[in-house]
């Protein structure tokens, strides 16, 4: 049975289903015990599991470290950080402790912990509440880093992370919290390390992840009506990256565009293009293109933030460039489209 | 204590004669702290350490050969050569790991105690770190977390007067009070003479008992670090020491003091103590020989164990 649920419902459902069968799972973080806990992602769980849904002192470093200590002692914690900026208080525990623990002690020392970290754009949040530090976490071996891109992947990836024995950084694009999808009610998992081909196509490959997928799907629909066949790959995992999936696609299409919703320098697209060129330069019929935010902090003014984030229009324009077409894209986007988080329904193929 | 002292002292020569590429922080002089605390622990109690943890590891019962082999980068080291001196672990004796980033072990030990509480166990977790680490904010955060959740936790601050060679007076206001910080956060503060085994043992007994009842304790042990911060040498020439001069350290040596007590109370004779010390030295020499002839890991090991299976 499938229900049409939101991204935050999906996180709540995966958490609930794991807690019902695994008594070692607990959730710790600021506000997780509130009625609409953590933006709805822990809604109603405090009543069901009063001892395992734990509000905490405002001490991100110690709370995260206590999670690491509990994880190596038989528990399976989910540590929640409502903004990535707060998780940075705890970066030693994530990057230097959890990520290294198994390797530095010579194996046999698993750290089964999930760092749920909200990232990215949200209206009016400005430079210090919207960072999307994908490459920071993605560059750390020892962490598994995933970015759900829809309600179905949010549920499947969290469920898979809750069965893994390694530290998983689960980066939640807040922009997607209101998106919806028909999601299986029964528990299921989605493979943590594999990219997903969301749309099959032949003219070019678009590689994206997280909240980039909504824009890619919107562009794909626009172009499909104009007989351009776009293949969309959702990376899903940033550590490790499924380079083989990208390479297979580029071998087929000969053209590559990467779409990031974070700063251009050191963005995931740069890594994709670099590896793809090293391993498959002969496949390219056109220069690869990276679309990303400019290398400035995210501003607050709507006039500025509209110019900061790339949209489906930017992607469509670059598709024409990649294909050597001289089309003019006249489409203008509404204020709501640019500034309010999308109510996109992945099941409706909008 | 003799094992801790002589294993490191034998390693000094080995280090100076050979190219040993594992950064070390020797524990010489601080042995009474590790021994006095761990002698109060049950086998199922857990210990976490820091960068200077050879002593903590051995006092909890860690295997000396696995320690030395780890320093020499050998396959039979406690981390199979991937950790080195700053990463001691022997889970068979519940020495759960040591990590050198200052203060990092405080929340991890706190989380270990938290897990024990959640799982309904009655073991105690001990975390060792120094006076420098105690200045990290995460330590105060961890004490608050432990007090809030009534955790079976003992944090031991080994105050050896220096962070590398930075004096307490260069790092803290004259009005600074660790006791006030700890008690202000809702935990119990105890202090012991870290150069005196009997005093550490006495306070640790009380501390472990309180911790086991879910009342977290910080036990600060004032102690002398006999050697340099991170080299197997004596560094009096650097002239930073004020109270802990060479003469004072000899006078306060925890092993000499414990020997005197044992002789005074006629627990063992001088001859028996000498024999024990000689046997310990021989054991340490043999351990180093055994480690030195142990095999190195295969180069392919570089790529293993990034993730647990």
Image (spheres, coloured by chain):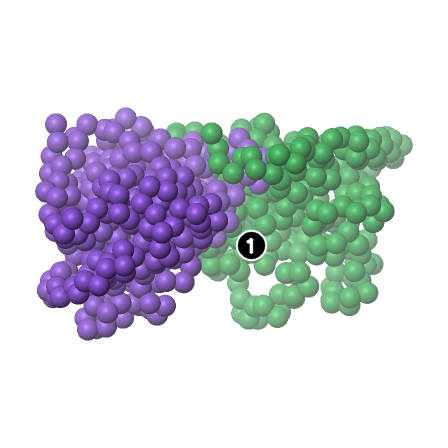
Chain colours: A purple, B green
- At x 35%, y 62%, the residue is A263
Choose between B192 and B158: the one closer to the eye.
B158
Instruction: Farthest residue to the right: give it.
Output: B271
- At x 68%, y 53%, the residue is B223
Q: Residues within 10 Å of mark 1 (few under 14, many from 20)?
A: some
Number of numbered discs visible in the structure rendering? 1
Q: Relative to B309, is B157 above or below?
A: below
- On the image, the x and y values in percent for residue B166 come to 65, 66
Q: Is residue B34 left or right of residue A3?
A: right
- On the image, the x and y values in percent for residue A107 come to 55, 33
Q: Relative to B32, is B273 above or below?
A: above
- At x 74%, y 31%, the residue is B295
Choose between B198 and A241: the one closer to the eye.
A241
Q: Is residue B109 left or right of residue A153?
A: right
Q: Relative to A33, is B170 above or below?
A: below
The quarter of the picture where residue A76 lies is: top left
- On the image, the x and y values in percent for residue B70 come to 69, 38
Disc 1 marks which residue?
Answer: B102
Q: Secondary structure at mark 1?
A: loop
Choose between B292 and B263: the one closer to the eye.
B292
The quarter of the picture where residue A300 lies is: bottom left
Query: Which image quadrant: the N terminus of chain A?
Result: top left
Q: Chain of mark 1?
A: B
- On the image, the x and y values in percent for residue A218 come to 16, 52
- At x 48%, y 33%, the residue is B308
The quarter of the picture where residue B54 lies is: top right
Q: Is residue A132 visible?
A: no
């Amino acid at each position: 049975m499938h229900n049409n649920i939101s991204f935050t419902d999906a996180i709540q459902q995966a958490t609930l289903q794991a807690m019902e069968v695994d008594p070692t799972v607990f959730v710790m973080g600021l506000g997780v015990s509130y009625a609409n806990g953590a933006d709805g992602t822990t809604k109603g769980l405090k009543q069901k599991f009063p001892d395992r849904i734990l509000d905490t002192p405002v001490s991100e470093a110690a709370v995260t470290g206590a999670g690491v200590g509990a994880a190596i002692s038989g528990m399976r914690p989910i540590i929640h950080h409502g903004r990535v900026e707060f998780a940075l208080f705890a970066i030693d525990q994530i990057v230097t402790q959890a990520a290294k623990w198994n390797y530095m002690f010579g194996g046999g020392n698993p750290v089964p912990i999930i760092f749920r970290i909200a990232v990215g754009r949200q209206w009016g949040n400005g430079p210090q509440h919207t960072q999307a530090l994908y490459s920071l976490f993605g560059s750390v071996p020892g962490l598994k880093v995933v970015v759900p891109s829809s309600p179905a992947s949010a549920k499947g990836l969290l469920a898979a992370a809750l069965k893994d024995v390694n530290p998983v950084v689960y980066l939640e694009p807040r922009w997607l919290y209101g998106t919806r999808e028909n999601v299986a009610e029964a528990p299921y998992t989605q493979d943590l390390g594999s990219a997903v081909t969301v749309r099959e196509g032949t003219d070019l490959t678009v590689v994206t992840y997280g909240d980039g997928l909504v824009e890619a799907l919107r562009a794909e629909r626009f172009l499909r009506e104009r007989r351009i066949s776009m293949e969309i790959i959702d990376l899903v995992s940033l550590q490790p990256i499924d380079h083989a999936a990208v390479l297979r696609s580029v071998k087929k299409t000969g053209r590559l565009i990467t779409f990031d919703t974070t700063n251009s320098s050191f963005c995931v697209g740069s890594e994709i293009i670099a590896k793809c060129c090293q391993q498959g330069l002969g496949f390219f019929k056109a220069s690869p293109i990276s679309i990303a935010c400019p290398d400035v902090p995210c501003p607050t003014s709507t006039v500025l933030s509209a110019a900061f984030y790339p949209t489906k229009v930017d992607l469509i324009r670059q598709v024409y460039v990649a294909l050597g077409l001289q089309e003019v894209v006249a489409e203008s986007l509404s204020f709501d489209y640019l500034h309010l988080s999308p109510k996109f329904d992945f099941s409706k193929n909008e | 204590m003799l094992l801790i002292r002589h294993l490191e002292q034998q390693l000094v020569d080995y280090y100076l004669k050979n190219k040993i590429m594992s950064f070390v922080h020797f524990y010489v002089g601080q042995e009474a702290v590790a021994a006095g605390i761990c002698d109060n622990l049950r086998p199922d109690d857990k210990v976490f350490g820091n960068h200077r943890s050879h002593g903590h590891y051995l006092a909890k019962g860690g295997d000396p050969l696995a320690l030395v082999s780890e320093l020499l980068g050998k396959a039979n080291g406690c981390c199979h050569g991937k950790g080195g001196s700053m990463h001691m672990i022997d889970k068979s004796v519940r020495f759960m790991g040591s990590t050198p980033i200052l203060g990092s072990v405080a929340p991890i030990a706190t989380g270990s105690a938290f897990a024990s509480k959640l799982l309904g166990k009655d073991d105690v977790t001990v975390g060792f770190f120094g006076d420098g680490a105690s200045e990290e904010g995460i330590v105060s955060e961890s004490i608050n977390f432990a007090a809030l959740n009534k955790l079976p936790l003992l944090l031991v601050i080994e105050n050896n007067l220096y962070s590398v060679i930075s004096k307490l007076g260069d790092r803290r206001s004259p009005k600074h009070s660790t006791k006030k910080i700890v008690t202000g956060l809702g935990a119990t503060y105890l202090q012991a003479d870290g150069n005196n085994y009997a005093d550490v043992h006495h306070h640790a007994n009380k501390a472990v008992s309180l911790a086991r009842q879910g009342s977290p304790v910080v036990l600060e042990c004032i102690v002398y670090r006999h050697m340099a911060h991170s080299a197997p040498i004596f560094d009096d020439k650097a002239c930073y020491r004020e109270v802990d001069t060479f003469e004072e350290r000899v006078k306060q040596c925890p092993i000499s003091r414990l020997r005197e007590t044992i002789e005074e109370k006629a627990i063992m004779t001088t001859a028996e103590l000498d024999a024990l010390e000689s046997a310990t030295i021989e054991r340490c020499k043999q351990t180093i020989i055994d480690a030195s002839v142990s095999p190195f890991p295969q180069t392919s090991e570089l790529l293993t164990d990034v993730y647990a299976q």
